[in-house]
């Protein structure tokens, strides 16, 4: 690893990188669970040029790497990650109307920031995003949504860049007819491509009406979800083929409120596993595996995680 790290730490090369670069950065600072060990190398690029600089380093060193946004749906190993973590929160923070009246947002824009602007400007149609953590890029990549809708319902164009792989540096634009989604996933982004921006279809509304709808949705979320504790949001995808929600599965196998160490299946919403303050990744993972095994053995249901893993488990 030392030889691989040396490429990125060489001062003569670092002049080509304008972002932040750190060694042994605690990843607990960069995910919603507030859990996890350090990353050997940690980068926050500020431009596409920075991304291309990182991609050159990866190509020349074959260093293991992982890309994150705000870390809202990650569980990081207690041992951290012995490679390079790239955090995409500074690439494009733009929010602007297009000439056609739609809305362009950079992939690094936090969902919370986008909704604040929507409430101020009277941009309707994005209310389904209320309560979704993370950034726009992650919303597009995983077709995030709530009971009010999903990204696919409102996104009309996606721009990306191929930063890893054979088409290094190629800019990609996907029009509405090319945007193919499934439940909690996209089917159009090639491997090694990262979302840089997207265009949303919005509906002009009275700003106070948008604000009121967002307030109602957020109040509902606070009443039904354990928002006062660190978590990754929904742990499991809904097993739609069985006609039930994931929380109903966990209830049926008796896991609501079940606790291992400082990790607990939430009392308020059993598709959340919360950190009571000092939970470890191994404790959270143990609850996840317990839920999967009970669902399989007792109900014949294969639960699939929404949460993503980073590091060794």
Image (tube, rainbow, N blue to C red):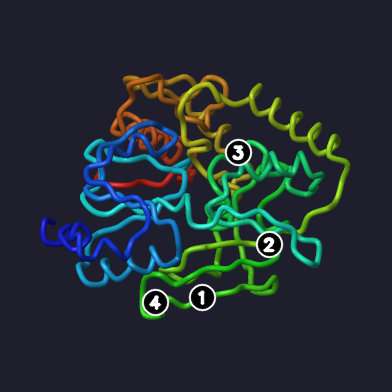
> Mark 1 or mark 3, which has the lower sequence index?
1
Q: Which residue sits furthest left?
A: 2
Disc 4 target residue? 168
Question: Which residue corresponds to mark 3?
Answer: 245
Q: Give the residue number, with chain letter if any, for mark 2.
A: 199
State whether residue 129 appears in this view: yes
Of the image marks 2 and 3, the number of the one nearer the N terminus: 2
**Label ID, residue 171:** 1
Task: Locate the N terminus and report the quarter of the image it occupies.
Answer: bottom left
Mark 4 vs mark 3, CA separation in Å: 40 Å
In the orientation shown, which residue stands out farthest toward the right?
Answer: 206
Quarter of the figure with residue 191? bottom left
Characterize the local packing of mark 3: few (<14), some (14-19) or many (20 or more) Cα atoms within 10 angstroms.
some
Q: Is residue 184 visible?
A: no
- Helix, strand or loop at label 3? It is loop
- The residues bearing labels 2 and 4 have C-alpha atoms spaced at a distance of 24 Å
Rendered view: 176 above or below 121: below
| SS assignment at label 2 | strand
Distance Cα–Cα, label 1 vs label 3: 38 Å
Q: Nearer the viewer, mark 4 or mark 3?
A: 4
Seen from the viewer's position, the closer of residues 90 and 270 is 90
Residue 159: percent from the left, percent from the top? 58, 68
């Amino acid at each position: 690893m030392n030889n691989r790290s040396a490429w990125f730490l060489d001062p003569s090369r670092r002049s080509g990188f304008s972002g932040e670069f750190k060694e042994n950065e605690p990843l607990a600072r960069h995910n919603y669970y507030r859990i996890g060990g350090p990353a050997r190398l940690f980068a926050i690029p500020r431009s596409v040029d920075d991304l291309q600089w990182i991609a050159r380093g990866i190509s020349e060193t074959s260093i293991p790497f992982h890309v994150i946004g705000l870390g809202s749906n990650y569980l990081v190993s207690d041992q951290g990650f012995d490679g390079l973590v790239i955090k995409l929160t500074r690439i494009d923070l733009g929010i602007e109307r297009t000439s056609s009246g739609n809305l362009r947002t950079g992939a690094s824009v936090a969902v919370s920031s986008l909704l604040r602007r929507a409430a101020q400007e009277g941009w309707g149609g994005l209310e389904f995003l209320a309560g979704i953590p993370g950034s726009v890029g992650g919303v597009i990549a995983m077709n995030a949504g709530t009971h009010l809708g999903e990204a696919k319902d409102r996104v009309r164009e996606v721009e990306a860049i191929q930063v890893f792989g054979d088409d290094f540096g190629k800019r990609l634009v996907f029009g509405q007819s090319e945007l193919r989604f499934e439940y909690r996933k996209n089917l159009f982004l090639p491997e090694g491509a990262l979302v840089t921006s997207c265009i949303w279809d919005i509906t002009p509304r009275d700003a106070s009406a948008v604000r009121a709808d967002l307030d109602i949705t957020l109040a509902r979320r606070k009443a039904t979800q354990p928002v006062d504790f660190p978590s990754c949001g929904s742990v499991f995808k809904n097993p739609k083929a069985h006609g039930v929600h994931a929380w109903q599965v966990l209830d049926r196998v008796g896991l609501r409120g079940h606790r291992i160490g400082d990790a607990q299946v939430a009392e308020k919403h059993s598709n959340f596993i919360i950190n009571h303050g000092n939970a470890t990744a191994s404790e959270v993972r143990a609850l996840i595996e317990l839920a999967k095994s009970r669902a399989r053995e007792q109900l014949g249901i294969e639960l699939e995680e929404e949460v993503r893993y980073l590091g060794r488990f």
